[in-house]
Image: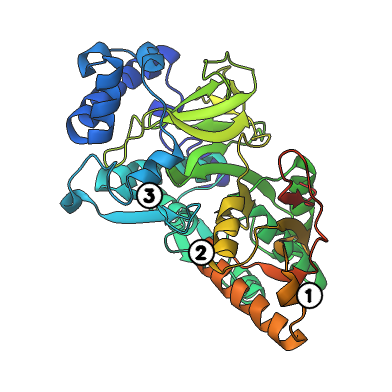
Amino acid sequence: MSENQYPKYFQPEIECASREELTKLQSERLSAMVKRCYENVPFYTQKLDELGIKPEDITSIDDLSKLPFTYKQDLRDNYPYGLFAVPNEELVRIHASSGTTGKQTVVGYTRYDLDGWASGAARAIVAAGGHVGDKIHVSYGYGLFTGGLGLHDGATKLGATAIPVSSGNTARQIQILQDFDSDFLCCTPSYAMFIGETVRDMGIDPKTLTVRGGIFGAEAWSEEYRQKIQELLDIKAYDIYGLSEIAGPGVSYECEEQTGMHVCEDLYYPEIIDPDTGESLPDGTYGELVFTCIGKEALPLIRYRTRDICMLTREKCSCGRTLVKMGKPHGRSDDMLIIRGVNVFPSQVEHVILTLGLEPNYLIEVDRINNLDVMTVKIEMTPEMFSDTVRDIEALEKRISGTMQSVLGVSAKIRLVEPKTLARSEGKAVRVKDLRKI
């Protein structure tokens, strides 16, 4: 079968459905989801009772605005399994992401959930030009992080060949790309850039590689960044979106047009709201992205506030897909950082500093060096600490670094600085300097 004979869509009955068909499906799934949440999740039972809402009141997707929002803090308050809507014996996998004080945000999946997630990732691979028989080189991290297993299962669902390389050891990554005839590279955009520059520095002509596409997500990246990756690796680079609380990569994905990401709205219904008032905003308006998990069993979150700022459009794409498209997020309505695909909150850093008995005068600097994110935490010493020997200070920096790695799940450089050297503010303290050009 030649390249252009492969199917253009993985699930055309969904991806190319009419708006009427999608609305009917979404309404049916929302109604069933709210009933399941009310009957099985005490948190939602209480929330709906407080609002005087019964499951039978929700009959259409148009009723969504009647329902309450769910926040990340709600998952922390019900740690680890309090928001699950199925008994533990129905769970087949657990994923988790870091929380602000070291506790993780825990997400469970049933077989049905994993199948839906894999379908979204498979749609993404096909939208990028992938097909049965392709070799999908997965360099996202495997484990509790959703990236690696997300694209892995998507490749398997499609019938492609997953190569579970995971992250790190760049020379080995390039050797595998060469020797295994990989067709697609899946990783964070910053790591794709690093691989591309390493290929160049090794004197390898990217045209000798069989890779023709890349599926990159888990961190923000600009159009200029995309062009640089495409030049370095001689590929087309596609964006993919996911978040652990909803599902990993495959919640939305770019098609060949590369002008926004199609949302799998049969599984995760999107809204845009005013982050301050909570009021729904029309298509084409930037606001906070909210998801309702109408296609999940284990953790069917209602109106989950992602804090990502973006916009939606329901205009039919020239690729033929009718699924709503979301633009690249233009920032966040909170102070979360994404460092090498890992969510990091300044409050996590402060938590570590305080638990180690240090003063909470600190500054987080994030930069992109050799196309990899580097986080440096500057912490003021007390006058007593400042009189310690250099060896003692270096030992303390190493101890803080180890604790940060354990809590955050990502490494940080620690610099203990002289007392009173970090700028003070009469208003809200400036805790973060993001120096990345993204």
Could you tell me the amino acid type at mark 2? Val
The residue labelled by disc 1 is 202
N-term-proximal mark, 3 vs 2: 3
Q: How far apart are marks 3 and 2 (CA)?
A: 34 Å
On the question of residue 214 being in view, the answer is: no
Residue 69 horizontal/vertical position (percent): 42, 27
Pointer 1 local density, CA inside 10 Å: few below 14, some 14–19, many at least 20: few
Q: What secondary structure is found at the residue carrying circle 1?
A: loop
In the image shown, does 197 or 281 lie closer to the viewer? 281
Q: Is residue 57 left or right of residue 390?
A: left
- Asked whether the beta carbons under mark 3 and mark 2 sit within 8 Å of each other, the answer is no
Q: In which quarter of the image is residue 104?
A: bottom left
Comparing 243 with 355, the one in front is 355
Residue at the front extreme?
Answer: 384
The residue at 77%/80% (across/down) is: 387
Instruction: Indicate left or right for 26 with 391 as reference.
Output: left
Residue of label 3 = 157
